[in-house]
Image: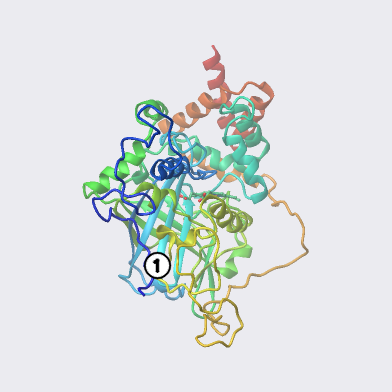
Amino acid sequence: MTNFAPTFLNTPNSNILTTGNGNPVDDNQNTLTAGEFGPVLLQDFHLIDKLAHFDRERIPERVVHAKGAGAHGYFELTKDIKDLTSAHFLQTVGTKTPIFARFSTVGGEKGSSDSARDPRGFAVKFYTEEGNWDMVGNNTPIFFIRDPLKFPDFIHTQKRNPQTNLKDADAFWDFISLSHETLHQVTILFSNRGTPYSFRHMDGFSSHTLKLVNAEGRVHFVKWHFKTDQGIKNHRREEAAALDSSNPDSSTQDLFEAIAKGDHPSWTVSLQIMPEEQAAHYDWNIFDVTKVWPHKDYPLVKIGKMVLNRNPNNYFAEVEQAAFSPSHMVPGIDVSNDKMLQGRLFSYPDTHRHRLGANYLQLPINQPYRAKVSHHQRDGPANYSQNYNGYPNYEPQSQDPKGPEQQINSVRFKYSPSNLAGKTGRYPYNTKDVDYIQAGNLYRLMKGPEQDDLIENLVHHIKNVQNPVIAKRAIDLFSKADPEYGQRIESGLKALKK
Ligand code: HEM
């Protein structure tokens, strides 16, 4: 008896057309009927097999970040950071780790425009020898909100009105103007950085504070930065709007064509590094994802290069089925107490089980193929592995042969402990007036045409708000960052009305 050997459908196995069941097909043009002009026969397995599979071709699109493009490549370590982390792939200069990256817009559906005003997702799967590490970030160093309870509500305001099925400027500005922590990210979003020229011409950020943990268990807090080597390039409002209709897939096309012709995009990877003991005394709450760490306090330290050099062979298999999660961690990299990040640790694998099924990690693009995967998970829908044959599916156990065992004495594999104080509770961030400072600094940092475009982009969005109370509240919010900021938006709206 031969061993069961699954076939990965990379190429057709022969030039004989078969059914899904492997039975040769005689005729792929004419349905089996009762007589020349009679009804179709139920016994036409080929027809039913073909239609039934077609009926199931779509899986749920991602609830956010549905439109995206991806590519394969590698990450190369260029600096020794052994003192910071025990992660295997970050030990030796020159180590190359295979990666898969996916870039996306956030709010639109799978067929929506690449040039929409939106943050861009920046997700990278590192296939390391100790399992996969997913860096699931954005092209912005911060985010709109900082509590995971607010995420579904926030996203509802970015999607369609439940009655009209139209984008709803009132809902958008209602939520924003009542959630002042959004001001900083909204200032980035309505600058021209909200409409990047392409996925190749934007930076990426972990946005959250993560931990690096070294072999002795010492912790540094870090933020990851991926700086584009192609240079930042953005569209102005009219250019982005024109592309919406002339080529809604411009960024997807740009990435694919650049890689196809050997123009491989790259990013310089850097860290902002904070020793654990400095966190409590820093000016900014480092677990508040609406704030940056100014570079003058924590400068960028270059540690590597990310290069994308291979297009997917099949979009569905490699891009649509890719499942990134901030909870896919490796020893030496750990999570922080950032509440948003903690909420995300649950949300992603949960949505993957819904979108792709309980065995989503068996899909080739998601497999931690460089690690030796051994566990006690079994069965489930679409389990196409050999399911660990007869090996024990429980622990503790004393069978022969033995199944995999926990590594209780390993310091490296332990979760890194966090300092805690106080009582359990639903605590708001203590941020009286703090939310306006970095937004105001960013507004003042933008000069001349850059600032003019920011105002114009905002005016052309707020003009769609029907409810004057909401519009007024939105203007007031910008005035809190800088009185001139709000005043210029107000004047712009008045001028547009005239
Ligand atoms: C995708 C939830 C915040 C970056 C997703 C998906 C969900 C989700 C359910 C779809 C995943 C899939 O179907 O595979 C959340 C929740 C958040 C949150 C609950 C807050 C509590 C953030 C933040 C960032 C981010 C702060 C960036 C710093 C991304 C990216 C993707 C994504 C890049 C697309 C990944 C891909 O390319 O497949 N998010 N998200 N999200 N999210 Fe979040």
Nearest the viewer among 92 and 80 is: 92
x and y percent of residue 70 in the render? Answer: 37, 49
Q: Secondary structure at mark 1?
A: loop
Q: Residue at (76%, 65%) from the top-left corner? A: 422
Which residue does the numbered mark 1 point to in the structure image? 369
Residue at the top extreme of this rendering? 498
Nearest the viewer among 222 and 158 is: 158
Crowd band around label 1 with a 10 angstrom C-alpha radius: few (<14), some (14–19), many (20+): some
User: Is residue 300 among the parts visible in the rendering?
Assistant: no
Q: Residue at (69%, 52%) from the top-left corner? A: 429
Vertical position of residue 377 compared to residue 201: above or below: below
Quadrant for residue 237, please give it. Answer: top left
Residue at the left extreme of this rendering? 261
Image quadrant occupied by the N terminus: bottom left
Nearest the viewer among 450 and 471 is: 471
Residue at the front extreme of this rendering? 35
Task: Please indicate whether residue 235 sits to the left or right of residue 162 in the image.
Answer: left
Vertical position of residue 191 compared to residue 227: above or below: above
Vertical position of residue 47 compared to residue 379: above or below: above
x and y percent of residue 415 in the render? Answer: 58, 73
Q: Residue at (73%, 67%) from the top-left corner? A: 421
Task: Please indicate whether residue 253 sits to the left or right of residue 164 in the image.
Answer: left
Quadrant for residue 377, please give it. Answer: bottom right
x and y percent of residue 139 in the render? Answer: 45, 47
Task: Please indicate whether residue 202 sits to the left or right of residue 297 in the image.
Answer: left
User: Is residue 362 among the parts visible in the rendering?
Assistant: yes
Q: Amino acid at mark 1?
A: Tyr
Image quadrant occupied by the C terminus: top right
Vertical position of residue 149 compared to residue 8: above or below: above
x and y percent of residue 486 in the render? Answer: 59, 29
Task: Please indicate whether residue 379 sits to the left or right of residue 26 in the image.
Answer: right
Q: How is the image coloured?
A: rainbow
